[in-house]
Amino acid sequence: MAVVLSRRRFLKVGGAAAGTAVGALLGLGVDLHPKQVRAQSLRIQNAQAFPSVCPYCAVGCGTLVHVVNGQIVNIEGNPKSPINMGNLCPKGAATYQLHVNPNRLTKVLHRPPHGTQWELIDLDTAMDRVAELVKKTRDETFVETLPNGKRVMHTTAIFSLGGATIDNEWNHLQQKLMRGLGIVRIENQARI
């Protein structure tokens, strides 16, 4: 007869066993802290640390970017930063993956209308296509005045969503561009 073990029961038994093992080690006077420090120092051994700023939101948390032979090997919070004192939010803690993730797209993919496959296209073609569609949509939906005569000069058919890795300077330029086009629906991912 097979023993049925629910996930809840497994976690209770496993957690109790792990707690007992750690408790026994600590009870015998084993100090695990030096092992943790050694493991952390090995990870960034021979690395050059560069102070930087987290690219997400506008808080400006300090980071330390560790580099070995021109390659980023680790990114962590900067304990000397008065803003975050070495702590990072989940987005900031994942900054390393922003740089080294093998699944990160580095080429422009385009799926034509009614297409079923993605195609690689060059960046200039993609930028021209975006500009063409923005102009076409704006021209077709631009409203100068409302029926009551109020002058509005806008389009509500285009929405702008800024990314959380965009810095304040780019956000300022994006706001100017979107407002200049008459776009009123503007948001930023860092606020959402």
Image (spheres, grey):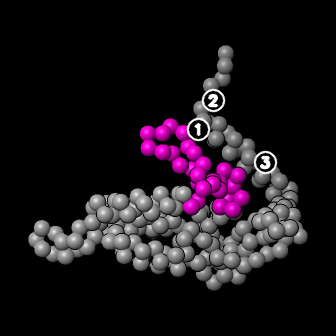
Measured as percent of width and height from the top left, residue 82 is found at 63, 84
Task: Specify the amino acid type for callout 2.
Answer: Leu
Q: Quadrant of residue 17?
A: top right
Q: Is residue 176 above or below residue 160?
A: below
Point out residue 155 in the picture as x, y percentages from the top left corner. 29, 66
Q: Which residue is mark 3?
A: 21
As helix, strand or loop, the secondary structure at mark 3 comes to: helix
Residue 57 in the image: state x and y as whole percent.
53, 71
In the rendered image, residue 102, in percent from the top left (x then y), is placed at: 70, 52
**Residue 12 is inside the magenta segment:** no
**Res 169 seen here:** yes
Residue mark closest to the camera, 3 vs 1: 1
Q: Residues within 10 Å of mark 3 (few under 14, many from 20)?
A: few
Q: Which residue is mark 1?
A: 8
Tell me which residue sits at (69%, 77%) in the image. Answer: 52
Q: Secondary structure at mark 2?
A: loop
Q: Name the residue rendered at 65%, 61% in the picture.
A: 98
The mark found on residue 5 in the picture is 2
